[in-house]
Each structure stands twice: as structure tokens, then as C-alpha cells.
Image (spheres, rainbow, N blue to C red):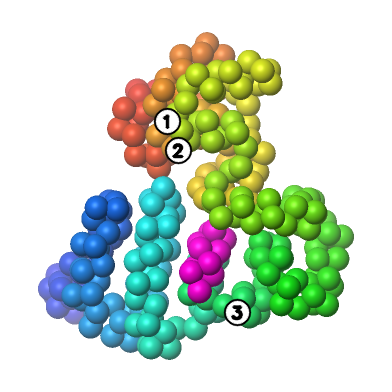
Amino acid sequence: MDASEFLSQNKDKYEILMQIQDLLNHITHDSYQQTIKFVDDNKNFFFKNKYNATLFLSIINTFTIYNFKMLELILDVCINFSKEIKDVGIKDEQIINIMRIMKCCTYYLFSKNFISIKSIIEKSVTDPVLFVYFYPEIDEYDHEYAEKVIYNIQNDSNETLSQFSDFVIKNPEIHKEYRKNHFNPTQLHKTIRNDDIDEFQSLLSKNNYSYNHNFDFSYYERTLTECKTPSLIQIAATYGSIKIFKFLWMQNDIIYDDNLICYAISGRNYEIIHICEEKC
């Protein structure tokens, strides 16, 4: 069978896949019901069997990364069809594995009772970050097990994870709040996300931040940036914050990599993308 014959025979399948990707890529609160209706109208395809349901979940996962600002809304599409997903034999452990890169997705599904703490514990055996992320719930469910694992993590060579676990243990309520918001919790990061140029300049001045300041890595951040310690201008590009981006771009000593345009594409602000195209 040549390529054209294969595509001809699978035309309907790929049209459905292209449409759901387009809907998720541009989903808004206004278009949410349209997306639900499309999936519902094509339930016989999406939930025909375990393979198709796994493909559906993988597409959901992909667009929580590419369309991260709408992460919760995209996951709500998945939750809306929880019965259909479970009915074809998809287990919690498989869902967690599909969502393994974005711990905030696992948390959101857990918060909506889509997956259980028991399944999270089972997967955390081989995923220490997942364990720390859900430490308060795991400790409540099985204190003895939690104590053993957290001791090993805190004495591990991974200093970043060890520090994170120490923060979670000492500040469980703050951790839960940060986890619920799914964003880097610093005020400077929030100011960039909100494109509040006046507050941004004030924070730079008060804290003597360089224009090339880099954020520390955060387990709460919902974006997957190439750099684990992104710069101010990279975050401004990622969140499409045009006022702050332009302010930083005009600074004589600003440092930016050629891949800044990748952050701009993620942020979906066409003016920022156009600016980056000129020099990146």
C-alpha cells in the first residue's frame, strides 16, 4: 500500500484528529462547549477501544503543554469524558504516565477526583518528584511509607528536589496553594504574567534586579521552557507580555539567545513574534 492509498483509506480518522487538535489549540471558555460537542459527536472514534482512548489522552496532554494558559479548560474536556475513558479499560496509572511531564496536570485531575491517591502512590515509587508533589496527601494516607521515602529523598544527591521536599514538609498549606495555582509563585513572575509594567519596574528598582535576571527553577511552573532558569525576557515572551517584553528589548545590555523566538511562539503574541523574527 502506497502513501496516497493509506491516506485515502484513513481520511476520516485524520480529519477527526486534525479537528480536535485545532479545537484544543484555540480553546476558550466560549468555545469549550463546541469542543465537548465535537468529542461527543465522535465518541465512537475517540473511545472505540483502549488504543483510541490513549491517543485522545495523549492529544489532551500535548495541548496542555502547547496551550498552557488554557491547561485547566483542556483537562476539563478530558474529565467530561471520564466514564468513557474508564469504560475502555484505561487505568489511573496509565493516565498518570501520559501526564508525567506536567505534574500540575496530575494534580488537577486528582483535585477533580479523576484519579486516586492510591494510584499516585503506586506511580510515585519510581517518580520522586511526583511523591514530593503529593507528599501531604501521601503522608495522610500512609504516614509510615511517607516517612521512609521522604528521608531517602532528603538524603539524595538531587539538591533541588531535596530543597523542594524540605519546603513542602515545612510549609504544607503554602505548597497546596502554590500547587493549586500552577504558576511560579514569585511576585516578579506574577507581575510579568500580568504584564504590569509599573509594578515590574518598581520591583526591579527595589530589589536591584538586573535586566538579565534569571528565575530559579520552580516545580510549580506550568510552562516547559528550554532553560530551567529562564530570564525575564524569556518569561515575558512565553506569557505574551508585550509591554514588559518591549521594555526589556530596548535595554542596551539585554542578553537574549537566538531561541527567544521559540518562547515567543509559545506565548502566541504576534507582535512579540514579529520583533523576534527581525533578530532571532
Q: Quadrant of residue 79?
A: bottom left
Q: Residues within 10 Å of mark 1 (few under 14, many from 20)?
A: many
Q: Residues within 10 Å of mark 2 (few under 14, many from 20)?
A: many
Residue 249 screen position, x and y as percent? 46, 19
Quadrant occupied by the C terminus: top left
Query: Which numbered dot is residue 238?
Result: 2
- The range drawn in magenta is 102-113
Which sits earlier in the primary sequence, circle 3 or circle 1? Answer: 3
Which residue sits at x=36%, y=28%? 272
- Give the side of residue 41 with respect to residue 151, left or right: left
For the residues marked 1 and 2, what is the alpha-carbon distance in whole angstroms? 8 Å
Residue 215 screen position, x and y as percent? 63, 35
For the residues marked 2 and 3, what is the alpha-carbon distance in whole angstroms? 33 Å
Front residue of 54/244: it is: 244
Q: Are circles 3 and 1 on residues that touch, CB within 8 Å?
A: no
Query: Which numbered dot is residue 241?
Result: 1
Quadrant occupied by the N terminus: bottom left
**Front position among marks 2 and 3:** 3
Tell me which amino acid carries mark 2.
Thr
Which residue, given by chain and number where applicable, does mark 3 sit on?
A: 119
Which secondary structure class fits the magenta region best?
A: helix
Tell me which amino acid carries mark 1.
Ser
Q: Are circles 1 and 2 on residues that touch, CB within 8 Å?
A: no
Which sits earlier in the primary sequence, circle 2 or circle 3? Answer: 3
Q: Residues within 10 Å of mark 3 (few under 14, many from 20)?
A: some
- Give the side of residue 145 with respect to residue 24, left or right: right
Residue 4 screen position, x and y as percent? 14, 70
Residue 231 magenta: no
Tell me if residue 259 comes above or below residue 95 in the rendering. Answer: above
Q: Are circles 2 and 3 on residues that touch, CB within 8 Å?
A: no
Q: Quadrant of residue 23?
A: bottom left
Q: Is residue 248 visible?
A: no
